[in-house]
Amino acid sequence: MPKEKASPAETLGFLRRILPRLKPYRPHLVGAGVLMLFSTGVGLAFPLLVGTLIDAPSQALLNSIAIGLIGLFSGQAVVNFTQSYLTASVSERVVAELRNDTFRALVYQPPGFFATRRVGELTSRLASDAGLIQGVLRFGVPELIRQGVFLVGALALVTYTNPRLTLVTLTAIPFAVVVGWFFGRRVRRLSTTIQDRLAGAVARAEQVFTQIRTVQSFTRESWETEAYGTEVNAARDEGLRRAVARASLTGIVTFVAFGAIVLVIWEGGRLVLAGDLTSGQLVAFLMYAVTISGAITSLAGFWGNLQEAAGAAQRIWEILDTPVAIVAPAVPTRLPVPSRGVVRYEGVSFRYGPDLPLVLRGIDLTVEEGETVAIVGSSGVGKSTLVSLLPRFFDVEEGRVTLDGIDVREAALDELRKRIGFVPQEPMLFAGTVKENLLYGNLEATDSEIEEAARAAHAYEFITSFPEGFDQAIGERGVTLSAGQRQRIAIARVMLERPKILILDEASSSLDAESEALVQDALERLMSDRTTLVIAHRLSTVIRAERILVLDDGVIAEEGSHSELLRRSHVYDRLYRRQFEDALASTEVGERG
């Protein structure tokens, strides 16, 4: 998380990192800069022209100057439009690229990265934090340049016109700088806190919406509303403190600036009375003094905005600077084609963190081509961890995992994972249509291939019963579908992927008997001629497996067929009777009948 206190180094760091992103758009920025200089030049010339207008000796000259001003400001309006569009187009493109880079940095992180972070907080960084940066690029930087030119130009002109009055005007600058620095630090610190609070609120809201059935089944609507309100109200309170800081900054700087104007009017009035200054010259000088005061106020406000953007940027840089834990080698080894699907674990040990105990210890395992291996064991013993090492969702601490003789760490990640299909116990579908979810397995699949996969997964019948068929929207995470329907769509999706290896987190363990039968038949079709690793929860899966591994205390305690293990393994017999008691009872009842 970003530090609470502001520092010039962090602000400069923000500028150093954002400027390279602006380089590709130098023509746009140069064009906008030239147009801005022209517009600012018109603004600087205006007080002089007004002074000349007031001191005009004839009606004809008065009319000419007035008409000239109208024409000048018409041109300035066109220039301002073009400059504003160029600046906005650059800010939109830069922030879009920043969001894309941040999303890319996140999406390539392994699952372990997201296990310790709230998804809502990460999405908040993509949205609100990047939005603050966009605001500074679109409005803050152009205003900084414009007001900076106004300040320097106006100071040069008033110094040339009347050095005495210039000294009076300059009395405001030191005070404004000190005030801007002091309150800018506070605004930055509060802005960082606000972003953190809002990220927490977004994370909670996302969690509630994705688990709305659980929330409502436990009647926790009021509790969740109160918890969300606590986060939002905390952000509101910090926002009010920031409003006080920004209002104080604006109020004090405005007071100092216009106090200086009062002094200019007083001193200028004395000079007019003494005959050392004309009325037109005094008006022109006053307009320059107002320009200087406005520039100082705007620059102080920009400093506050820059502090906010720097704080938001720190949260984005944190993501961009987080190294991806699982990366492909610079020169990957090609996996054999066609793939045999032979999997080996050689002395594999793994732990989730340097200070945590080993989950797996010295695992040696070979799964031959087309073999189905079931993995059983107590909850938390490392079954899911074992199979997650194959597609490199995590990397081994010791030993190695190979696919067709190639260490998975030496293969290209996309090539490795395309050969592995994964069907989880709770399939995750995306908001969208049935067809879009199926195509996720193979973006180039034809309609006939999609239908064939749906039929093989016993999903075609219920899909075609929908009003929109394959174009039916299924809601967030497939909420409009039953558990069995979601599972069959997930199986069809993997069928379209055509992997050589399957990882099944017992995809039928939470289904009713009818749905289980359909899903089990679909899984058998999917498993045909494929190497399969199954995390087993159901008796039927264990019995069908060619080999069963009993995982206990981080090691493979026993292995063999179902009947062999029942005869000689006390560990398996205990697991079998404890985990599959209901299924066993059903089987015995059926046999007695």
Image: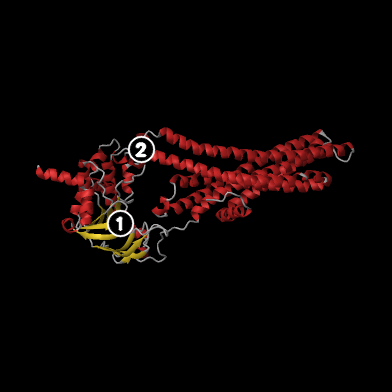
- Depth check, mark 1 against mark 2: the one in front is 2
Q: Can residue 590 be seen in this view?
A: yes
Q: Residue 531 carries which label?
A: none
Q: In this view, does 306 lie to the left or right of 221?
A: right
Disc 2 marks a residue whose amino acid type is Thr
Q: Are marks 1 and 2 in contact (CB under 8 Å)?
A: no
| Residue tagged 2 | 214
Q: Residues within 10 Å of mark 2 (few under 14, many from 20)?
A: few
Residue 241, image x, y percentages: 60, 39
Q: In this view, does 487 lie above or below 348?
A: above
Residue 41, image x, y percentages: 71, 46
Q: Is residue 370 visible?
A: no
Residue 349, image x, y percentages: 34, 62
Outermost residue to the left: 593
| Closer to us: 103 or 145 | 103
Q: In this view, does 459 lie to the left or right of 210?
A: left
Name the quadrant of the C terminus.
top left
Residue 445, image x, y percentages: 30, 50
Q: In which quarter of the image is residue 63?
A: top right
Q: In which quarter of the image is residue 414?
A: bottom left
Real-space Cα distance between discs 1 and 2? 32 Å
Disc 1 marks a residue whose amino acid type is Ile
| Closer to us: 354 or 135 | 354
| Residue tagged 1 | 420
